[in-house]
Image (spheres, rainbow, N blue to C red):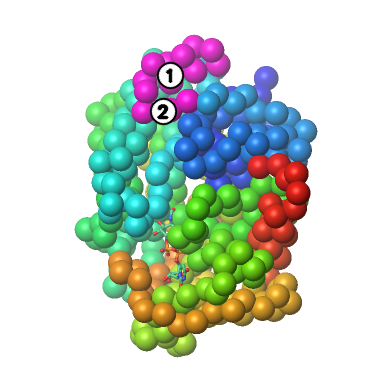
């Protein structure tokens, strides 16, 4: 009897890749998603990779009755991975209440129902954004949490506090909090990947759409930062590496061994790449030129941040190992797939 896991936001970018890795590790996957930032075709993509169609419930986790019905109709869920959240930094500044309502009510509803339905643990999708602009790099889990620079980042900080307070209140659950750096790339099958709706806010989808001719040129938001080539530095982590970390975290959290009730891990490669370096990595990996210009800085951007992944490497036994060139080739293959006629997803 395989262990049943609920993946909220499971038709989204990281959620869908994690659903694939969970199934391939032998878990039974139930997905709930309100399709506000994805589409149901992703379920076909997951099935086409693993040969197993996950249970899919279209619904909103901010409605506790919907979640209660899901747990009633899918008994035996032992763990949750919570991806369901709004995640656009800029949009969160324009619509803070949408972000606080969606991201916090979703988490509170899940936590509230877990003991009632025997759910033992929750893996929470957090972000390096909780660190703000770090005083030094690489950054480990003991780095200070700085005041959030956006409502989106604040919802991640508050969510971590909610989980901590709930566990410390004696709730019979455990949690592993995963702080992602910058997820990029697509599944090597090119059957699932990042599906940005509208104009992409993030670098890599905008870059691939420019390479594909959908966008005229990429704007590099500033080259006057205090970095070797003047452009901002990030820790770009392959989405499949990231997904695998969730499976390892879930296994650890549900294992009978006596681990702490709450653990926090930074998920990054430990390697910083500038915007200009990423552009050249894409060009050399694919042979496709990316027209770009240098523009003004983007408000709220952090100058440089990359992870110290030692804790995840040593305690989880997980390491990001997909080379950036492979990530670039996979993301380009995905971009070409979604432009092909009659595509799934
Ligand atoms: C990366 C770099 C930009 C677009 C955000 C969230 C983070 C996570 C990932 C959810 C920056 C530069 C970008 C462009 C550019 N979100 N850039 N031209 O801002 O590091 O992180 O998304 O989990 O929590 O904060 O990612 O991809 O937007 O930007 O030059 O058209 O690329 O200035 O230096 P970011 P990003």
Residue 313 is covered by the magenta coloring: no
Q: Can the viewer see residue 49?
A: yes
Q: Residue 199: where, in percent of width, then height?
A: 49, 58
> Could you tell me how far apart the alpha carbons at marks 1 and 2 are, in whole angstroms?
7 Å
Q: Does 49 sit left or right of 295 as displayed? A: right
Provide the major secondary structure of the magenta segment: helix
Indicate whether 139 appears above or below 193.
below
Q: Secondary structure at mark 1?
A: helix
Quarter of the rendering occupied by the N terminus: top right
Q: Quadrant of residue 109?
A: top left
Quarter of the rendering occupied by the C terminus: top right
Mark 1 residue CB less than 8 A from any atom of ligand 1: no
Q: Residue at x 36, y 20 (%)?
A: 64
Q: Which residues are magenta?
A: 59-74
Residue closer to the observer: 309 or 153: 153
Q: Residue at x 68, y 52 (%)?
A: 338
Q: Residue 44: where, in percent of width, then height?
A: 70, 35
Q: Quadrant of residue 125?
A: top left
Q: Can the viewer see residue 21?
A: no
Q: Does 261 sit left or right of 39 as displayed? A: left
Residue closer to the observer: 276 or 40: 40
- Dot 1 surroundings within 10 Å: few (below 14), some, or many (20 or more)? some
Q: In the image, which disc is placed on residue 66?
A: 1
- Residue where numbered disc 2 is placed: 61
| Picture quadrant of ligand 1 | bottom left
Q: Residue at x 28, y 31 (%)?
A: 166
Indicate whether 314 appears above or below 304.
above
Residue 69 is covered by the magenta coloring: yes
Indicate whether 197 appears above or below 81.
below
Instruction: Tell me whether circle 1 and circle 2 mark residues in contact (CB < 8 Å).
Output: yes
């Amino acid at each position: 009897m395989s262990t049943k896991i609920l993946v909220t936001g499971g038709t989204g970018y990281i959620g869908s890749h994690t659903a694939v890795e969970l199934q391939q590790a032998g878990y039974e996957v139930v997905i709930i998603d309100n399709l506000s930032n994805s589409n149901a075709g992703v379920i076909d993509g997951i099935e086409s990779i693993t040969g197993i169609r996950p249970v899919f419930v279209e619904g909103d986790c901010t409605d506790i009755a919907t979640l209660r019905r899901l747990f009633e109709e899918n008994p035996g869920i032992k763990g949750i991975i919570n991806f369901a959240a709004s995640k656009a930094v800029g949009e969160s500044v324009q619509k803070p209440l949408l972000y606080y309502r969606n991201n916090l009510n979703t988490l509170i509803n899940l936590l509230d129902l877990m003991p009632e339905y025997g759910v033992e643990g929750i893996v929470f999708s957090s972000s390096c954004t909780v660190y703000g602009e770090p005083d030094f790099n690489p950054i480990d889990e003991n780095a200070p949490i700085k005041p959030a620079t956006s409502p989106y980042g604040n919802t991640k900080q508050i969510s971590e506090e909610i989980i901590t307070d709930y566990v410390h209140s004696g709730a019979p659950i455990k949690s592993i909090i995963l702080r992602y750096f910058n997820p990029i790339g697509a599944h090597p099958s090119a059957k699932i990947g990042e599906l940005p709706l509208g104009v992409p806010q993030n670098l890599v989808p905008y870059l691939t759409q420019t390479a594909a001719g959908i966008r005229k040129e990429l704007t590099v938001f500033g080259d006057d930062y205090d970095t070797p080539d003047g452009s901002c530095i990030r820790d770009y982590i392959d989405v499949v590496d990231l997904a695998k970390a969730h499976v390892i975290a879930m296994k650890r959290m549900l294992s009978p061994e006596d681990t702490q009730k709450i653990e926090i891990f930074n998920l990054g490669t430990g390697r910083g790449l500038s915007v200009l370096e990423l552009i050249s990595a894409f060009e050399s990996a694919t042979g496709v030129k990316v027209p770009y210009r240098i523009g003004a800085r983007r408000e709220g951007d952090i100058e440089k941040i990359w992870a110290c992944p030692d804790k995840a490497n040593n305690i989880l036994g997980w390491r990001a190992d997909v080379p950036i060139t492979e990530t670039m080739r996979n993301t380009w293959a995905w971009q070409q797939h979604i432009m092909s006629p009659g595509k799934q997803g």
